[in-house]
């Protein structure tokens, strides 16, 4: 039996295919030279590659009599395999062999694949010898001293449940964990790990042991100060003192507190950065470097009206954002205008400008013109035939005046309500519908009385002439129609089609088709002479809807593995698991299982994930990882 070193020969084979496609004799001579050189170097016994090189010439072009996929023990693989490019009865071809290897790798089940050949009189028998993958299972961190928390440390490692186990990924995860520990002052932490493989389920438990050592302390503090305040005035506001424990949250909180102080003093563009210096292992201390810039001082002035300081801070985003730019100034202007319009000053206008004065001071002035105070007496609609006045009123944000209230009115609300009315008509097939507004500020001759009239131009309505669903094979058309809102005779709208798309894809995803695709086709249908629109009807063209569906492969649950628990009886967990082998992988079952397990009040974390999530193998092993809370003993 001969073994091909498929990976090591790949570059040579590619070169053959491109450079010598028609020169078989020359290629035979080339391999003869290679074999001669290898024999002269006296390669150690047991290496299969030289023998493979000698046989490669005799194997290519021979008829393939058998193709098997076997494991290390020679037992045939029992899982469902895709049709391979290398097939029985065909002539052996290295391109087909390479494509078959790629197909097997894409399944995601194997970590290594080698090819063996057994020449016989009738041809050659090919075996793909595979080595099974192991998958990340329970990842636990022991000995950790928070901060960081265990969940934050696990997130830093990025060893996701069900993904293929790779030693390289584990080493990179440990390095990220080391960085996370250093960010929280654990510079002397020592990290070790141990593996617990389960050959029957191909799961790999990973236990990371952390010896945290003493947490570093804050050392000297240096300040790069670009403010009018002294270092002694600034530092107390960060709440950071030397010899305190060094943690990332303390540094972040200190930076925020110091910036809040500067913003409160009027320096809205202030910036504060606190960065750790080089760790001193002898003193176990980390120096801190402050970089503080105040920028220009900003003062806000209000003219034409009064606003309490607290109101001003809630209306102006420059305080919350800690910065000043034109967008924030205009947003604050609109907020002040809307505030006064809600108070009944419906014609209120606000302008903003900034002035540069001496001593590095910038003054932002909001000029407020309140105008007269109004009350919203009523709202009316014209041109509406399809929808009633009561239905349209229910969609308005405007509110008419009532006892002790002048109503709710602003120009922004009027525009928003007009858009809402137009969207309602569009969603019901009136694709050209328009809605405009008119405001009368002297209603019935009374000054200060407002009356708003919305003028509706409905236009023509489009309807669905027919609906066809194509491409569905695993799911019946009747089942899909149950989640489709667009039907024959109903108004046609883009919003309804988008809703149908979401419902259909959600249905397929929940039935185990994660790669399902949807594409709609809208075909105008001209009215026939036998069935013309009624006279005076506002009905526009009818359309025929065709929903094209690509279902893709269906993912089935091969088996369900329970892991992570230590004290809870497995039977209790099994009763809550709604995922079952032999059924489609439904997203709803996964969510329901997670909810049920959390409702037991026993588990602090529940993860549910498939093994080999990125592989093309349609049969997935689902892993339910239920981690229990800490147990405390009394005594």
Image: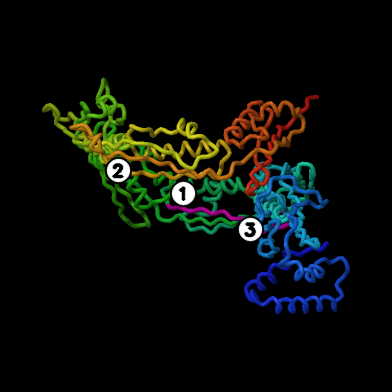
Which one is nearer the viewer's eye here, 513 or 297? 513
Neighbourhood count class around disc 1 (C-alpha, 10 Å): few under 14, some 14–19, many 20 upward:
many
Q: Residue at x 61, y 41 (%)?
A: 555
Q: Residue 113's quadrant in the figure?
A: bottom right
Q: Which residue is mark 3?
A: 277
Q: Within the magenta stretch, is there residue 278?
A: yes
Q: Judge from the rendering whether residue 312 lies leftward or rightward of residue 514; answer left or right.
A: left
Q: Tell me which numbered mark, 2 or 1, is placed earlier along the sequence.
A: 1
Question: In this picture, is 348 found above or below 360?
Answer: above
Q: Residue at x 76, y 27 (%)?
A: 569
Q: Judge from the rendering whether residue 301 lies leftward or rightward of residue 514; answer left or right.
A: left
Q: Which residues are magenta?
A: 269-286
Q: Which residue is mark 1?
A: 262
Q: Tell me which numbered mark, 3 or 1, is placed earlier along the sequence.
A: 1
Neighbourhood count class around disc 3 (C-alpha, 10 Å): few under 14, some 14–19, many 20 upward:
some
Q: Residue at x 32, y 40 (%)?
A: 543
Which one is nearer the viewer's eye here, 14 or 152? 14
Q: How is the image coloured?
A: rainbow
Residue sticking out furthest to the right = 45
Quarter containing the N terminus: bottom right
Q: Which residue is mark 2?
A: 302
Q: Tell me the distance, in whole angstroms, between the alpha carbons under discs 3 and 1.
A: 24 Å
């Amino acid at each position: 039996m001969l073994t091909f070193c498929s990976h090591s020969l790949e570059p040579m084979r590619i070169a053959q295919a491109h450079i010598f496609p028609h020169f078989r004799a020359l290629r035979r001579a080339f391999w003869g030279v290679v074999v001669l050189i290898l024999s002269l170097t006296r390669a150690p016994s047991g290496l299969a590659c030289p023998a493979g090189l000698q046989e490669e010439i005799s194997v290519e072009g021979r008829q393939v009599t058998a193709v098997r996929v076997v494991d290390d023990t020679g037992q045939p693989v029992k899982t469902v395999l895709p049709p391979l490019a290398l097939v029985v009865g065909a002539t052996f071809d290295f391109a087909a062999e390479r494509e078959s290897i790629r197909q097997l790798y894409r399944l995601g089940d194997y970590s290594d694949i080698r090819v063996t050949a057994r020449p016989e009189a009738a041809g050659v028998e090919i075996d793909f010898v595979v080595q099974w993958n192991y998958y990340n299972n329970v990842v636990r961190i022991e000995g950790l001293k928070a901060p960081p928390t265990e969940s934050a440390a696990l997130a830093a490692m990025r060893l996701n449940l069900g993904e293929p186990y790779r030693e390289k990924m584990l080493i990179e995860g440990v390095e990220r964990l080391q960085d996370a520990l250093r960010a929280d002052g654990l510079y002397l932490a020592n990290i070790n790990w141990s593996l617990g493989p389960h050959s029957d389920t191909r799961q790999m438990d990973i236990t990371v042991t952390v010896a945290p050592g003493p947490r570093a302390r804050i050392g000297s503090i240096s300040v790069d100060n670009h403010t009018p305040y002294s270092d002694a005035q600034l530092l107390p506001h960060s709440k950071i003192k030397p010899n305190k424990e060094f943690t990332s949250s303390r540094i972040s909180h200190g930076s925020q507190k110091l910036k809040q102080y500067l913003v409160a003093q009027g320096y809205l563009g202030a910036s504060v950065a606190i960065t750790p210096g080089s760790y001193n292992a002898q003193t176990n201390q980390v120096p801190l470097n402050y970089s503080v810039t105040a920028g220009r001082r900003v003062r806000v002035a209000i003219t034409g009206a009064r606003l309490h300081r607290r109101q001003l801070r809630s209306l102006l985003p420059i305080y919350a954002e800690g910065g000043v730019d034109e967008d924030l100034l205009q947003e604050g202007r609109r907020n002040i205008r809307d505030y006064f319009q809600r108070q009944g000053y419906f014609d209120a206008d606000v302008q903003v400008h900034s002035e540069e004065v001496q001593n590095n001071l910038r003054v932002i002035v909001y000029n407020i013109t309140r105008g007269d105070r109004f009350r919203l007496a009523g709202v009316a609609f014209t041109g509406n035939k399809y929808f009633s006045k009561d239905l349209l009123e229910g969609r308005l944000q405007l509110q008419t005046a009532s006892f002790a209230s002048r109503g709710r009115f602003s120009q922004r609300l009027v525009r928003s309500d007009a858009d809402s009315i137009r969207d309602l008509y569009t969603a019901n097939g009136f694709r050209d519908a328009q809605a405009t507004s008119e405001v009368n500020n002297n209603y019935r001759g009374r000054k200060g009385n407002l009356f708003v009239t919305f003028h509706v131009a409905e236009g023509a309505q489009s309807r669905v002439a027919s609906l066809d669903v194509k491409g569905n094979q695993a799911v019946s058309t009747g089942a899909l129609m149950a989640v489709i809102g667009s039907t024959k005779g109903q108004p046609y709208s883009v919003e309804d089609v988008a809703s149908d798309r979401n419902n259909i894809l959600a249905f397929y995803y929940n039935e185990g088709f994660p790669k399902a695709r949807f594409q709609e086709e809208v075909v105008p249908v001209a009215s026939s002479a036998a069935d013309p629109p009624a006279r005076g009807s506002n009905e526009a063209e009818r359309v025929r809807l065709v929903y094209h569906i690509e279902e893709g492969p269906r993912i089935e649950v091969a088996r369900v593995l329970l892991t992570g628990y230590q004290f809870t009886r497995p039977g209790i967990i099994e009763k809550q698991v709604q995922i079952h082998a032999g059924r489609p992988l439904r997203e709803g079952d996964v969510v329901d299982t997670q909810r049920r397990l959390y409702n037991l009040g026993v588990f602090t974390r529940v993860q549910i994930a498939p093994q080999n999530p990125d592989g093309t193998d349609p049969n997935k092993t689902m892993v339910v990882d239920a981690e229990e809370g800490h147990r405390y003993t009394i005594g």
